[in-house]
Amino acid sequence: MTPDSVREQLLGSLLGALDEDEQQAIETRLDCEPALRAELAAVRQQLEPLKLLAGDDGPPPGLAERTCRFVFSHVRPAPAGAPLRPTLSPSTATAGWIGRISWIDVALAITVLACAALLMVPAVQNSRFHGRIAVCKDNLRELGTSLAQYSEHHDGYFPRIPTRGKLAAAGIYAPTLASQEYLVEPQRLVCPGSPLAERRTFRLPTLNALRSAPPAELPALRAEMGGSYAYALGHVLDGAYQDRQNLYRTNYPIMADAPGSDLPDLQSQHHGGKGQCVLFEDGRGDFLASPVLMGGDNIFLNGRQEVSAASDPDDAVIAPSPVPPLRER
């Protein structure tokens, strides 16, 4: 058996490509021949770059260059007149070009293709990630337009959140906008990076459906009526709850991806937990890596570190759909 055919047998063993008789034969030889075991260790070391294919963290620096060096170090022109290398299993080789391919050739081709895929997949995932953020921000800007139009016809106020009754939840803004035809595309309430987007359909409940819902069905309706987004609660002044007024402030958030519960600072779990899209009072949408603004104000918490009405008109508290404006004490 030639050195090349030995290496092909060892490579086939490492890749699990030998049939049962061939595998048994190579294992018998390995038990008896220390030099063959050393050769196996050398082949295994040369396949080490294949381990780079494991994991989802993207290619390490220099992977492409190392892969090319690895490939070219094994591509050697055959001497003139040299016979073709035998295949792994000559008895089963087919005629034509397939019979001239060795396991070294196959392994190198697999390595090159797999490494190319490894380089491309993170780029595709990154493009998809930014595409979903772009759609989410566009959703919020459209909702911001609807909120602004509503405020222009309601004495400068955004949709109010009742403090008691079946409609007393942050997400009531959406059915309110829809009931007066300020919201004509309910799908705008679904962030493409949220679990809600994985469902085939999203149905926005009407105000009448909420008012007539039996107690057992009401929690589910309230939880989804705001879609994927959270909405700004009002504030308490002199013991009385005050609705949010549209002052077109530049850095005052009024909507955002709904907050989570498992990440620090109630970071939204949309977009892979890497941040949240936020709509500001002046209609601007942005993607923030943290819900904590400059100055330490968390957009999901009031001054008492609660998801409840703010204690002053300048404190923004953006609450998920089922949260009432006032906490029961």
Image (spheres, helix red, strand yellow):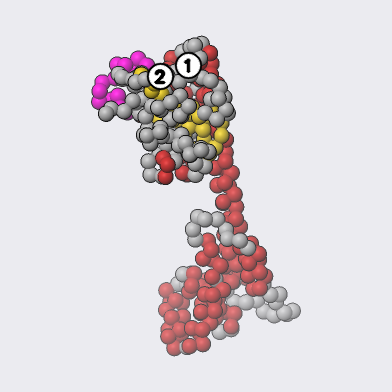
Residue where numbered disc 2 is placed: 242
Which comes sooner in the sequence, label 2 or label 1? 1
Where residue 215 sits, quadrant-wise, is: top left
Circle 2 SS class: strand
Where residue 93 sits, quadrant-wise, is: bottom right
The residue sitting at the front extreme is: 238
Q: Quadrant of the N terminus?
A: bottom right
Judged left or right of residue 293, residue 310 is left
Q: Residue at x 64, y 73 (%)?
A: 74
Q: Residue at x 31, y 19 (%)?
A: 164
What is the C-alpha distance between the residues marked 2 and 1?
A: 10 Å
Q: Number of numbered discs present? A: 2
Pointers 2 and 1 in contact (CB under 8 A)?
A: no
Is residue 329 rendered magenta in the image?
A: no
Residue 326: percent from left, percent from top: 33, 25
Where residue 157 is drawn, which disc sits there? 1
User: Label 1 amino acid?
Assistant: Tyr
Between 130 and 147, the residue placed more toward the observer is 147
Residue 98: percent from left, percent from top: 60, 66
Closer to viewer: mark 2 or mark 1 = 2
Residue 313: percent from left, percent from top: 45, 24
Where residue 48 is drawn, which disc sits there? none
Between 303 and 65, the residue placed more toward the observer is 303
Q: Would you place residue 206 above or below residue 50 in this image? A: above
Is residue 216 rendered magenta in the image?
A: yes
Circle 1 SS class: loop
Where residue 69 sits, quadrant-wise, is: bottom right
User: Label 2 amino acid?
Assistant: Gln
Q: Quadrant of the C terminus?
A: top left
Q: Which residues are magenta?
A: 203-222
Between 162 and 182, the residue placed more toward the observer is 162
